[in-house]
Image (cartoon, helix red, strand yellow):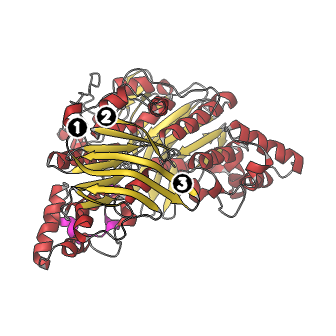
Amino acid sequence: MPLSSISPDHPLLDVRDLAVTLESGIPIVSGISLSVAAGEIIGLVGESGSGKSTIANALIGYARRGTAVASGEVRIDGTDLRALAPAALRAARGSLVAHVAQDPATALNPMKRIGAHLEEALAVHEPTLDHAQRRARVALAAEAVGLESGTEFLRRFPHQLSGGQQQRILLALAFVLKPRLIILDEPTTALDVTTQAQVLAVIRRLCRDHGIAALYVSHDLAVVRALADRIIVLYAGTIAETARRETLFHRPTHPYARGLLAAIPDVAARRVLQSIAGHAPAPADRPAGCAFAPRCDRATDLCRATAPPLSLVEADHAAACHHPVDAPLRIDTAVTADAAAAESAPLLSVRNGEAHYGVRQILRGIDFDLPRGRCTALVGQSGSGKTTLARALVGLGENISGELAFDGQTSALDGGPRDRDQRRRIQYVFQNPYRALNPRQTIRTILRNAIRHFFPVSRLEASRRAAAALERVALPAALLERRPHDLSGGERQRVAIARALVCEPDLLICDEITSALDVSVQAAILALLQRLQADGLTILFVTHDLAVVRAIADRVIVLREGRIVESGPAARVLDTPEHRYTAKLLSDSPRMSGDAKPVPLLAIA
């Protein structure tokens, strides 16, 4: 395939036939060729295990322990990265190419002040600068990412900043050395929509104003649609499809790309979400033919026998598929529950809820009801009090006051230890299932312990119920003998839900349980929750993702700075918000339907 047909004429980043393998020689990624022009942003998308981060690491000359860059060329502004000696490669990391990590909490030294982080980068890479010059460059970098440049702010420690400010510091660390290329690895995954919009605006403005090329790695295709100029879809370590943004989102040809897009919720309208069956194969388990064939309903004997080459569909559009789909992508809309149906009798009510952390008040005058058998979404920016409120409902919290009514029984919101029956009937699913599941126990033991804690049954009966719970969350009974680290993120999250379900709850509280999942896994989890709700389960879904709210919620509660500023049926709140804060959250949310709303380039709030 003539790569010039889908590449810029004068690329700043030029990658040819890149391959990264395990020590055994098994390829993790192979045949990767891509180009990025100055000022251009390329989105690199795909499920976990597709090779996104492996490629991102290779572009800064790094390979994780047990892997190696086996072949290929990586040229940045004409410099062959693979030909550099170790000292020259270290110098190139920062001055030529910079990397922005996903989690600033692990990338920033908690013992070092913000200004010191930036000055140290300059001292290492540009030692000829004097103190005044370094200070001027630090101030310029801080201002460029929309942060204060004064001494007081720069003397703060990372823990004294919000998540969005910490992420901007990582961008400033990349920008302060004026690199030609920036690699961004999931930099907005854990951010609320408003903070995410601000960070994306910084990225877009830096690339435009300074001619920086960017590779944006993400599993969030809605964000990629708002930011990227071109998109590369990876599957099992190879490029499945590449095209300009609007081409890919309106007329994808590879079944895998179409499946990803069909799994994404949209804040603009409730969609019928479709997850992709099966799982991406591990490097050692990839089939001889098309790696996607076992999951593809269009696969033939040709697909199973021969891997398809990356071939041109049209100018600026290529796909690796023997049987590409020549049709626009159409996603059906789903029926939204009407307001009357959502107004069923409350299972749980809170009146005058208050919460404090020391002298700081977190929740103020909280009054709300959770209708029985309905899904209510609790939304708001980071720091709004969502998790504090959700945890208070199960008795996890201190300095809480107010009145709680659950199924007709009234008690103080901070009523001390809950009785056994209420603890069984209100179950909590945490955001991180890996931390919530005992890594030393098998799935059978984890589920059986939860069952026998609440029900006087034999070990045999508890094992039977555990297997039934896995079946209910669409997992095979064979997983009972595995441990959490043997499972994928989506499987662990389903096990966490299964552990809650074996307690036979009436109310399930889900705290950001899909925020770190691939879109296909997220679609499967949302479909599971909808089935559970149809069986009569009441759900409180805590999230900052309004597209997910649109997909699953009957009602919405909007929380801002510890106060409920708006609540009501989901369709009404999302279509005609009454509070300007709700309208702002909706405005900042990337959309999948209609024309792509570009990231704003105006002044950053």
Q: Position of residue 424 (x, y in %)?
A: 23, 65
Distance from Cα at disc 3 to Cα at disc 2: 28 Å
- The residue to which callout 1 is attached is 342
Q: For the point 28% across and 40% down, which residue is it? A: 552
Are the residues flagged by discs 1 and 2 in contact, CB closer than 8 Å?
yes
Q: Position of residue 378 (x, y in %)?
A: 37, 45
Q: What is the crowding at mark 2: few (fewer than 14 residues within 10 Å), some, or many (at least 20)?
A: many
Query: What amino acid is found at the position of numbered circle 3 in the picture?
Result: Gln
- Tell me: 484 left or right of 344: right
- State how many labels appear: 3
Specify the segment rendered in magenta: 478-490
Of the residues tagged 1 and 2, which is closer to the observer?
A: 1
Q: In this view of the protein, which residue sits in the foreground, 163 or 390?
A: 390
Disc 3 on helix, strand or loop? strand
Q: Does residue 257 appear anywhere in the picture? A: no
Q: For the point 34% across and 43% down, which residue is it? A: 377
Q: Position of residue 1 (x, y in %)?
A: 42, 30
Of the 4 image quadrants, the one containing the C terminus is: top right
Name the N-terminal-most of marks 1 and 2: 1
Query: What amino acid is found at the position of numbered circle 1 in the picture?
Result: Ala
Q: In this view of the protein, which residue sits in the foreground, 60 or 142?
A: 142
Are the residues flagged by discs 1 and 3 in contact, CB closer than 8 Å?
no
Are the residues flagged by discs 3 and 2 in contact, CB closer than 8 Å?
no
Q: Is 371 covered by the magenta stretch?
A: no
- The residue to which callout 3 is attached is 361
Q: Does residue 295 appear anywhere in the picture? A: yes
Query: What amino acid is found at the position of numbered circle 2 in the picture?
Result: Ala
Q: For the point 60% across and 36% down, which residue is it? A: 203
- The residue to which callout 2 is attached is 570
